[in-house]
Image (cartoon, rainbow, N blue to C red):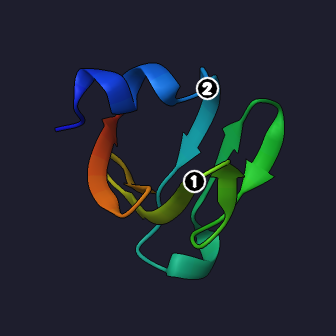
């Protein structure tokens, strides 16, 4: 869980599509209108580590957090 200060420093992320596939090559998300795959830098200090069935695992400045599906 992110501290309140870390959460406040994050830019708002608008996820409009989340596609999970058993094949990692078929996984992607649409974040702020851009197609993102695993390993992508989606904001300053934020990396999309893994797309899971239940959401996305993010690395936020060295801390792992789950962004759940809406």
Q: CA distance from mark 2 to mark 1?
A: 10 Å
Which quadrant is the C terminus positioned in? Answer: top left
Name the quadrant containing residue 47.
bottom right
Which residue is the site of mark 2?
11
List the single residue furthest toward the right: 33
Residue 19 position within the rendered picture, expressed as x and y whole percent measured from the top left: 55, 50
Answer whether residue 70 is visible to the viewer in this image.
Answer: no
Name the quadrant containing residue 30.
top right
Which residue is the site of mark 1?
45
- Look at the numbered disc 1 and give the secondary structure of its residue: loop
Q: Residues within 10 Å of mark 1 (few under 14, many from 20)?
A: few
Residue 40 position within the rendered picture, expressed as x and y whole percent measured from the top left: 67, 65
Residue found at x 83% / y 32%? 33
List the single residue furthest toward the left: 1
- Look at the numbered disc 2 and give the secondary structure of its residue: loop
Comparing 40 with 37, the one in front is 40
Q: Earlier in the sequence, mark 2 or mark 1?
A: 2
In the image, residue 68 sits, relative to residue 46, either above or below, namely above
Residue 68 position within the rendered picture, expressed as x and y whole percent measured from the top left: 31, 34
Which quadrant is the N terminus positioned in? Answer: top left
In the image, residue 4 sits, relative to residue 64, either above or below, namely above
In the image, residue 44 sits, relative to residue 20, either above or below, namely above
In the shown orientation, is residue 3 left or right of residue 18?
A: left
Q: Residues within 10 Å of mark 2 (few under 14, many from 20)?
A: few
List the single residue furthest toward the front: 5
Residue found at x 29% / y 57%? 63
Comparing 35 with 53, the one in front is 35
Residue found at x 36% / y 64%? 62
In the shown orientation, is residue 51 left or right of residue 26?
A: left
Residue found at x 60% / y 20%? 12
């Amino acid at each position: 869980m992110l501290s309140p200060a870390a959460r406040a420093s994050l830019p708002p992320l608008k996820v409009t599509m989340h596609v999970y596939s058993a094949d990692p090559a078929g996984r992607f998300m649409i974040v702020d209108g851009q197609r993102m795959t695993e390993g992508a830098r989606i904001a300053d200090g934020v990396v999309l580590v893994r797309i899971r069935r239940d959401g996305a695992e993010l690395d936020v400045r060295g801390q792992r957090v789950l962004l759940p599906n809406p």
